[in-house]
Amino acid sequence: MPTLNGVPLSCEEILDRYGALVYRLAVQGTGSPVDGEDVAQEVFVSLIQSDPRFTDELHLRAWLVRATANRCRSWGTSAWRRHTVPLEPGWDAPAPAAAESGVLEAVAALPAKYRWPVYLHYIEGYTAEEIGTILRCPRNTVLSRLQRARKKLKDALKEEWT
């Protein structure tokens, strides 16, 4: 069982606290709620099997975010993924609200190196320094990626709105 400050955490407690976060990240990383569920499940199984010791809540949260990002990356390059096709394109994806669809599609279309910092910063509220720690890159790299992502989003959305 994983521990936080020497206190064992139950599976129910971990899922209650962090289930929604990991699921949101997994759906964002895979682009599909069904695949997001699979990735989230793999992250929690990995957490339980690895039996880590965390010093504080931030350490646990960062581990989960990083593990989810890694699982999404390996999911995208897996042999299983390359050799399967969906029954119908987008059948499992929820329809976004009409006003948000362009923004969500534009963010989803960003390369992963830009998509993750945008999601972590604007949706999850992490600072550039925290994102750098999670993604294992310097703070200035995160800031550059955020700036480039904003420019790409501006260009993509400008085309849509004109």
Image (spheres, grey):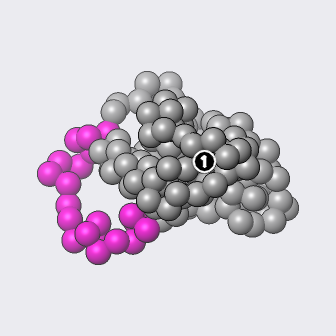
- Image quarter where the C terminus lies is top right
Q: Can you name the residue that lies furthest to the left here?
A: 87
Query: In the picture, residue 142 is in which quadrant?
Result: bottom right
**Relative to 11, 143 lies left or right:** right
Q: Position of residue 107 (x, y in %)?
A: 55, 46
Task: Residue lying at the far right in this picture: please name it.
Answer: 140
Q: Is 58 drawn above or below residue 84 in the view shown?
A: above
Residue found farthest to the bottom: 79
Q: Quadrant of residue 145?
A: bottom right
User: Looking at this view, is 34 or 60 the one in front?
Assistant: 60
Instruction: Examine the image and state in which quarter residue 45 appears.
Output: bottom left
Residue 61 vs residue 104, the one in the foreground: 61
| Between 29 and 13, the one nearer to me in the picture | 13
- Is residue 129 in view? yes
Query: Which residues are the magenta region?
Result: 74-93
- Residue 88 location, x and y as percent? 17, 48
Residue identified by numbered label 1: 3
On screen, residue 131 versus residue 153, left or right, reads: right
- Which residue sits at x=50%, y=61%? 50
Residue 54: x %, y % from top left: 67, 51
Q: Main secondary structure of the magenta part?
A: loop
The residue under label 1 is which amino acid type? Answer: Thr
At x 82%, y 53%, the residue is 129
Where residue 73 appears, x then y in whole percent? 48, 65
Q: Nearer the viewer, residue 103 or 130?
A: 130
